[in-house]
Image (tube, helix red, strand yellow):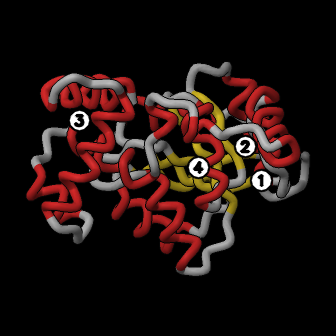
């Protein structure tokens, strides 16, 4: 690794203490350096243009938008940098979604420092990084016709849009605010809320709110 330029990493996470911890970890590696830290969707786009990173390390839950939306947007804009999702959210729910959005890997925050650094290096080298369990799960779905997590019930059964709305509910947004955020009708948002309630087996709208708040707090 000596002599080669360091890989430049843009860290996108809405918790400043997490960003700083990751930056300290990565800057201590001989081949990696953090070129920017963003706490929101918009700030990530600004720093992406300013810093030209090799890899973007992004959380799923951001203050203003969803991390998967950020990945889709940068891919739609033609950016070819590598993206690794680092999140507390269960990889069985999000890993495949992240890859479909345009990420090259997914690693959970609960993993050790060595695992996170290894994931960044593999993604920077053009490889795909997920845990062996998720890799096997995706492979089985592709070649064996096994149902995906979206068919399995619970959080994993929510569509990407339902997950976005679920997070908005957890952040205290009402139907009108969610409709404006995603340019949907209030009726469409209510339909999504009804689907979420049914899929999660909740008995009331209040129970959906409680589950959504717990989900956001875990992120």
Residue occupied by mark 2: 120
Q: Position of residue 36 (x, y in %)?
A: 49, 54
Residue occupied by mark 1: 124
Which badge, 4 or 2, is on the more N-terminal residue?
4
**Between marks 4 and 2 in the image, the one whose residue lies nearer the viewer:** 4
Mark 1 burial class by Cα count in 10 Å: few <14, some 14-19, many 20+? many
Residue occupied by mark 3: 170
Residue 108 visible in the snapshot = yes
Q: CA distance from mark 2 to mark 3?
A: 30 Å
Which badge, 1 or 3, is on the more N-terminal residue?
1
**Between marks 2 and 3 in the image, the one whose residue lies nearer the viewer:** 3
The local secondary structure at tag 4 comes to: helix
Q: Position of residue 49 (x, y in %)?
A: 49, 74
Which badge, 4 or 3, is on the more N-terminal residue?
4
The local secondary structure at tag 1 comes to: helix
Mark 4 burial class by Cα count in 10 Å: few <14, some 14-19, many 20+? some
Which of the 4 image quadrants contains residue 133? top right
Residue occupied by mark 4: 97
């Amino acid at each position: 690794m000596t002599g080669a330029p360091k890989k430049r990493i843009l860290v996108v996470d809405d918790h400043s203490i997490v960003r700083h911890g990751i930056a300290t970890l990565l800057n201590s590696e001989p081949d990696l350096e953090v070129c920017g830290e963003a706490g929101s969707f918009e700030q990530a786009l600004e720093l992406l243009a300013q810093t030209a990173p090799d890899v973007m390390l992004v959380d799923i839950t951001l203050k203003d938008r969803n991390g998967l939306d950020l990945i889709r947007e940068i891919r739609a804009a033609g950016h070819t940098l590598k993206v690794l999702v680092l999140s507390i959210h269960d990889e069985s729910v999000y890993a495949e979604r992240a890859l479909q959005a345009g990420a090259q890997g997914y690693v959970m925050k609960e993993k050790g420092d060595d695992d996170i650094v290894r994931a960044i290096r593999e993604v920077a080298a053009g490889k795909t990084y997920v845990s062996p369990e998720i890799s096997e799960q995706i492979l089985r779905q592709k070649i064996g016709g096994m149902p995906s997590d979206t068919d399995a019930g619970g959080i994993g059964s929510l569509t990407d849009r339902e997950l976005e709305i679920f997070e908005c509910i957890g952040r205290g947004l009402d139907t009108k605010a969610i409709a404006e955020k995603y340019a949907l009708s209030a009726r469409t948002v209510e339909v999504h809320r009804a689907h979420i309630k049914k899929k999660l087996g909740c008995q009331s709208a209040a129970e959906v709110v409680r589950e959504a708040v717990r989900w956001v707090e875990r992120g």
